Image (cartoon, coloured by chain):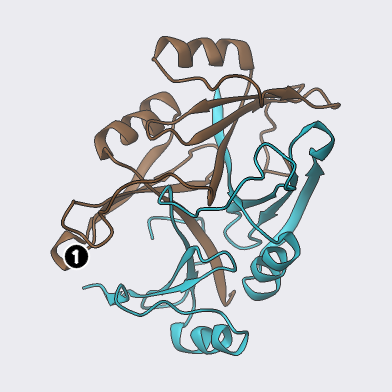
Chain colours: A brown, B cyan
Amino acid sequence: MPASYLSYVGIRVRDLERSLRFYTATLGMKEVARGDNTATGGGLYVLLQDPWSEQRLELNWYPPESRFGGPYVPGEALDHIAFRVADLPPFLEKLRRKGVEFTDGSADHELADGTRVVYVQDPDGNALEVYDRPGPIPSGPLEGY
Amino acid sequence: MPASYLSYVGIRVRDLERSLRFYTATLGMKEVARGDNTATGGGLYVLLQDPWSEQRLELNWYPPESRFGGPYVPGEALDHIAFRVADLPPFLEKLRRKGVEFTDGSADHELADGTRVVYVQDPDGNALEVYDRPGPIPSGPLEGY
């Protein structure tokens, strides 16, 4: 048994239902738990898990009266959230149809190994990296990118 | 095969070696990949994975001349990074010995189910939630918290 393990990364969202729809309906994650700390000055939180990669992401929403409910400045600590996709062009088309904001494309790039990387935005304007790699998504455990 | 999956969450760090030491030596994560986009205006990145939970975290560092290398304001988008620990008191003692900064304790709390939650800081001042729960860490796949 380990002394500790990384359980999840939590992001703050400004509209919980909007972000929940985005990360589940558009990006395929599943809700696995939720809780409510508002009675003790905290917020609402929903734990999402990806059914394929098992990676987790927590959405945190704070009411204005919470000590964590002040103005939302995205900042630099959250650099980006990365989704690997099976095939980039149709996936980007789906995101466009759903009204997802694309960045200006200046950071989009292709790596020497054929990985294609495009940046879009989540509902709070956070950078989402979507990338594909040559060949199918492996069925085994995640290894590297 | 899924159309997409959550691959990892990336945070920006101001000192790559310092954060790498923190997340590996202190928190038990392992480096699984790294890359260098500095030639094309990006930065250095190291992908970490937890050997127990398999959850992933990418550290991103940008040189000052990168368009992503501007002033670092943590902001609110990254709410917190959560580590479950087997037993909170000795783990907190280890963190203290290693010089980890603790927050003021005002957000620390205990839930009705016995979960104990304490907040400390990573090297860039980001909130780390460390929590334990009654009973041992389960050996199977992650479920809920």
- Relative to residue B97, is residue A60 drawn left or right? left
Residue B92, percent across and down?
A: 49, 84
In the image, residue B74 sits, relative to residue A128, either above or below, namely below
Q: Quadrant of the C terminus of chain B?
A: bottom left
Q: Is residue B124 above or below residue A27?
A: below
Residue receiving disc 1: A41
How far across and how far down the image is residue A125, in percent?
Answer: 43, 33
Q: Residue at x 21, y 61 (%)?
A: A37
The 10 Å Cα crowd at callout 1, few under 14, some 14 to 19, many 20 or more, is some
In the figure, is residue A8 to the left or right of A24? right
Q: How many marks?
A: 1
**SS of the residue at dot 1?**
loop
Q: Position of residue A131 (x, y in %)?
A: 65, 26
- The chain holding disc 1 is A
Q: What residue is rendered at 32% in x and 36% in y?
A: A20
Q: Is residue A121 left or right of residue B145?
A: right
> B75 or A8: nearer the eye?
B75
Identify the residue at image location x=55%, y=72%.
A4
Q: Is residue B90 above or below residue A65?
A: below
The quarter of the picture where the N terminus of chain B appears is top right
Residue B2 visible to an observer of this rendering: no
Residue A17: percent from the left, percent from the top?
A: 25, 35
Q: Residue at x 36, y 78 (%)?
A: B134
The amino acid marked with disc number 1 is: Gly
Q: Nearer the viewer, residue B97 or B27?
A: B97
In the image, taking residue A56 as reference, residue B16 lies left or right, namely: right
Residue B120 can be seen, yes or no: yes
Q: Out of A12 and A35, give the one closest to the viewer.
A: A12
